[in-house]
Each structure stands twice: as C-alpha cells, then as structure tokens.
Image (cartoon, rainbow, N blue to C red):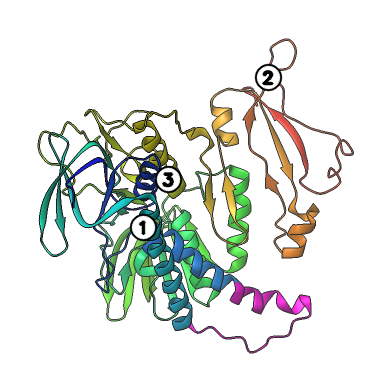
Amino acid sequence: MSDSFDVIVIGGGPAGYPAAIRAGQNKLSVACIDEWKNPDGICAFGGTCLNAGCIPSKALLESTELYHRAHEEFAAHGIKAPDVTMDVGQMQKRKAGIVKTMTQGILALFKAAGVTPLQGHGKLLSGHRVEFVAHDGTRRELTAKNIILASGSAPVELRSAPFQSPQIVDSWGALEFPSVPKRLGVIGAGVIGLELGSVWRRLGSEVVMLEALPDFLAVADGQVGKEALRHFKKLGMDIRLGAKVTGAKVAGEAVDVTYTDVKGEQKLTVDRLVVAIGRRPYTKDLLGPETGVELDERGFIKVDHQCKTGAEGIWAVGDCVRGPMLAHKGKEEGAMVADLIAGNFAEVNYKTVPSVVYTAPEIAWVGLTEEQVKAQGKAYKVGVFPFLASGRARRLFHHTSAVAGRSRPHRRPHGGRSARRRHEPRGRGPYQGWAGGGVREGGPRD
C-alpha cells in the first residue's frame, strides 16, 4: 500500500468524506483517515452526523412523530387506533439499522471513487506529512501534496453540570435512552435541544427546557421564534427562558438541578438531564509542532474564505473552522476544497447556508433576519404567508398561524428615503383576507 497521496483527508464526517470522494472523482489519489469508534467497538465513517447526530436523531424524530400523530391526529381522519403503543427497543433497533446502512454506504462510495479508507488517528506533521496510528497500534507516516483537516466538533460540557452517564448525558446519550424517562430536563433550547426534547415529549416524558437566553430561538427571525414557542408549548414542553443552570447533582436515580431566573434561585428534579448547549471544535492531538496551522481564541482552525490555512497546501473544513456547525455547510466546503485542489473553480456562498430545526412542523431560515436587517439600517420588505391558507398545511395538520418570509434589503423608494412601515390594504393579494397575511416595508426609521 502506497504511503504517498495527492490528498489526505483527516476526518471522515460530513465535511471530510465528501472532500475525499470529490477529490477521487477529480482523478486524484486520496486517503481518508477517521478514528470514530462506536460504544460497541465497531469503527465507522460518517462522524457525529451519521453515527450520533443528524441521521439517528432524524430517525427518532420520524418514529415519534408517527406515534404522536396516531394518538393526536388519526381520529380526525377516521382512523381508529386506540391501542397504539411504542416499543422503544424496536425504535432504537430501526435507528441503528439506518445508521449502519448509511455508514457502510460511505465505504461503497469510497471504493467507487478510488479513495483509500484508513481507520485510526491522523496527526498533521510538518513537511506535508501525516502520522497515522491504526486502532491496533500500527504506525505509518504518510505524505501528500495537499492535506485537508476535517476533525469535526464535540459537545460542550457545562462546568456546573458535568456529564455523568446515564443520568447526565450529552446529545449522543439522549439518542440512546433504552426507555422513556418520566421527567427529562434539557439544558439549552437550541436546535439540538428542541429536537431531542420533541422526541421524548412525544413519547410521554415531562420535558423541562432551561434556556439561559431571554429570547426563544434567538438565531431565527423573531416572528418565527414566537410562533415556534407557541407550538412547543402546545406540545406540552415546559420552556423556561432566562434560566441559567448553577448546578446539577446526581441523587440516586435522579438529578437535582439548580438554576437562577428573574425570580431568583430555583430547583428542579428530573430522571435524566441532557446538556445541549452547543459544540466546540475538536482538534485534540491533531496538530504536531511547526505545522504552520493556527487556532483562534475559540479553538477553531484559522482559514480564509477558501478554507486555506496559513500553511501552504493545508486546508480545513467543517465544524473545526469558522461559520455555522452544519453538516451541509461542511459538505460544501469539502467539495469546494477538493475542486480547488484539482484546479477547478469553486466557492461557497455563506449567505445562503440554511438552518433547519427538524421538529413538526419543521422550522427553517436562510439569510438575514428582519432584526439583523433593521440593525444594519437598510430598507427591507417582509412577506408573511399564513399556513391557515395552505391546503397542504391543512392536509398535514401543520397549520400554525403564519410563517414569516425572509427579510431582505431592497431599493429605497424614489427620492432615496427609507420606506415607512405600512401594511398593504386588504384585497391587494389573494391571501390578504387571512389573518397574518400581507407585505410590509421597513427601514432605518422604524
């Protein structure tokens, strides 16, 4: 087996394996190194996304949504299913099967593209060298003209609530519960927390979410966040904003949580506690001395807009670099770098990277929010379309009151002055008669 390649990718997650496949498709010799190992000892490509994040969480979301609809919506369709129960073990078995199929699929894609898969730890050395240590301890030194770092990210651990499985777990642990916890606490009401909270709430858990920020889903448009909060409360999720966790202690089979809010110190007892406050770049033992690769103050690998590091021929993509920690963003970066290495034109437009919360109904946004546009002092228009007017939404029972269109800058009216906020008179559009529908303009003076 050759120890010299055109490209070596360190990391086989959603940024690394697409980079390796695209490089192989570009007729370059490629090796992809990944050290992921599941609790059962089985190695797998795919990183967090395929093994312990995106794919398994979506599998559980689908199963639990079907269960929830059977209880809450089927009767309206004339479907009588009073004795529907959930077999959590079978649900978990199905999830594991999906994950296995997806991860094995990567190996098939590698074979088709001529990529050499290497399972073990990769470490960047100086001089375009990579130290590879296989899981059995075998060491090899590899070389490549170009090296792509795609080491991914890891869950952030809260000092006041350190992980202590099985009571206090991260997002991966929350995907593996063998039974439905009676009382579930979730620290963090972001994308991960909302998805995991939804899964177990649908199955009957009493879910309490503790969010330190005063606003719900602050990264999304304000109107979308308010509508989403209403939906989650209707589902029965107890979402407490401005709640800063100060401690969590395992007490037998339960967890005693303390937090502060506007009313002072509060206490909460749950059976399981999920810490979902975000992720951090994972670069443990990734960089040897004198590689020329630098980390910023938050631990991210420093790169430019083309994902080039400060060292010639060394690139970095995905969660270990700046930008949103999203699988599709990492995939686009990986493919871009592989094309640039091959001498092709490629770029990523970061302004169009979408964000999604895979709950029911799903929540999505892309680009600037209305609040961000207003803060920039630009004129803009906002379109609002009510789901109540959508036949598809009504058919699916997903008729939340309204959805906000994307806020976007537009040309100022004649004379250069910003448009004042105004609502179009009813009757100007086909959906103006529905509550919440319409178009309005805004600008710096609103």
Q: Is residue 271 left or right of residue 293?
A: right
Looking at the picture, tell me which residue is in the foreground, 245 or 305.
305
Could you tell me the amino acid type at mark 1?
Answer: Gly
Q: Identify the element where label 3 is drawn.
A: helix
Q: Tell me if 277 is positioned left or right of 64 in this view.
A: left
**Does residue 61 appear to the left or right of 340 in the view shown?**
right
Query: Is residue 80 inside the magenta stretch?
Result: yes
Which one is closest to the eye, mark 2 or mark 1? 1
> How far from the left and from the top, in percent, is residue 349?
49, 32
- Between residue 240 and residue 127, name the one nearer to us: 127
Tags 1 and 3 touching, CB below 8 Å: no
Q: Which mark is residue 46?
A: 1
Check disc 1: other Cα within 10 Å, few if <14, some if 14-19, many if 20+: many
What segment carries the magenta color? Answer: 66-87
Q: Quadrant of residue 271?
A: bottom left
Residue receiving disc 3: 331
Q: Earlier in the sequence, mark 2 or mark 1?
A: 1
The residue lying toward the viewer, choosing from 429 and 288, is: 288
**Residue 188 lies in the magenta-colored region:** no
Q: Is residue 62 above or below residue 83?
A: above
The image position of residue 34, as x and y in percent, is: 26, 55
Q: Disc 2 designates what residue?
A: 411
**Residue drawn where x is 47% and y is 82% of the image:** 90
